[in-house]
Image: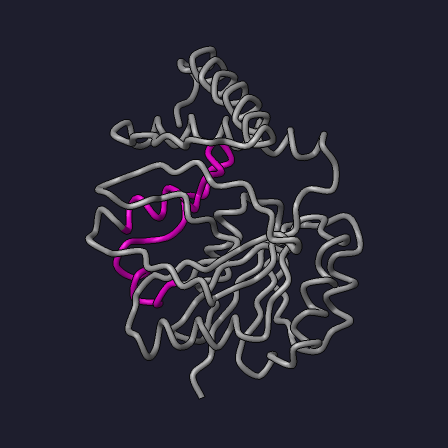
Amino acid sequence: MNKVSVVVPTLNNESDINRLLDSILRNDIQEYLELIIVDSNSKDKTLQIADSYTFPRIIETELCSKGEARNIGVKHAKHQAIANIDADTSLTKQWPLEVIDSIYNQKQRIVAGYSPNPTETNLPRVPILHKGQDITWPCCNIAHHKSVFEDVGYFYESYSMSAEDCDFNFRCIDKGYTIHYNPRMKLYHHERPSFIKFCKQAYWNGSYRYGLQQLHPELSFSNISNMQLKNLFRLSFGALGYLTGRYRTKKGEKHSSI
């Protein structure tokens, strides 16, 4: 049977991890996947919770970036289909079957899935285009054939630029790959539980996008019309983070670069 290796980086995710693991048991899909949890030195009960389930492979590492944790998981994957998700997701019954169909049967080398919140009231992503393709498909729900990593390399590992998914998408497109979209490859990505955490996430996303643009100056940002008020808040905090990232980089440019 074809299976998918699923990589989940964790760091202090005790409030998320058992929701993800329960979704796998509830939908009886553990036979279709190899779940690899790469824990970056959590100080809470993340490992204790994960260890109480029988099916995950748990890899413990020192504190590292999410990109490095993903790379560790990818390198330990046993199967040709490798999916990256986040700890704050929950899987649907059809999710692993759609990954398997896309990678093994449809021969797609990269496929991104549909990642709504549980109420399916998501804000639209703010796309960044490269050679006509959107590179902002997130690592909360994307799968690659193992050969893509052998060809393109691995995720960017620096703490200074945590948009490791966008950077990897950029490099894949540069190599001539197409990122396919399969809306049936559906999981739920749970939103930040408070407005303050939502704003913090938007702020850091903006800062990371500045770092991404430093790596790839040719990137172009596209526009979204009819934007919801909440998305305007998100973009406002993202812009603040972007400008702060630019300021921090200029202030420390003699000492380091992205």
Q: Residue farthest to the top?
A: 251
Give the vertical position of 252 relative to 230 (above or below): above
Residue 83: % across, % down: 46, 64
Q: Does the magenta stretch include residue 157?
A: yes
**Which residue: 49% across, 71% down?**
5
Q: Which of 91 and 14 is in front in this view?
A: 91
Give the vertical position of 97 relative to 167 (above or below): below
Give the vertical position of 99 relative to 229 (above or below): below
**Which residue: 25% across, 49% down?**
173
Number of marks drawn: 0
Give the vertical position of 234 relative to 123 (above or below): above
Residue 59: % across, % down: 61, 63
Position of 142 with respect to 19 (left or right) is left
Q: Residue farthest to the bottom?
A: 1
Residue 30: % across, % down: 61, 79
The N terminus lies in quadrant = bottom left
Position of 219 with respect to 98 (left or right) is left
The C terminus lies in quadrant = top left
**Which residue: 65% across, 77% down?**
27
Residue 244: % across, % down: 52, 17
- Way the structure is coloured: one colour
Q: Look at the image and give the residue range highlighted in magenta.
A: 144-172
Position of 106 with respect to 70 (left or right) is left
**Which residue: 66% across, 53% down?**
119
Q: Does the magenta stretch include residue 55?
A: no
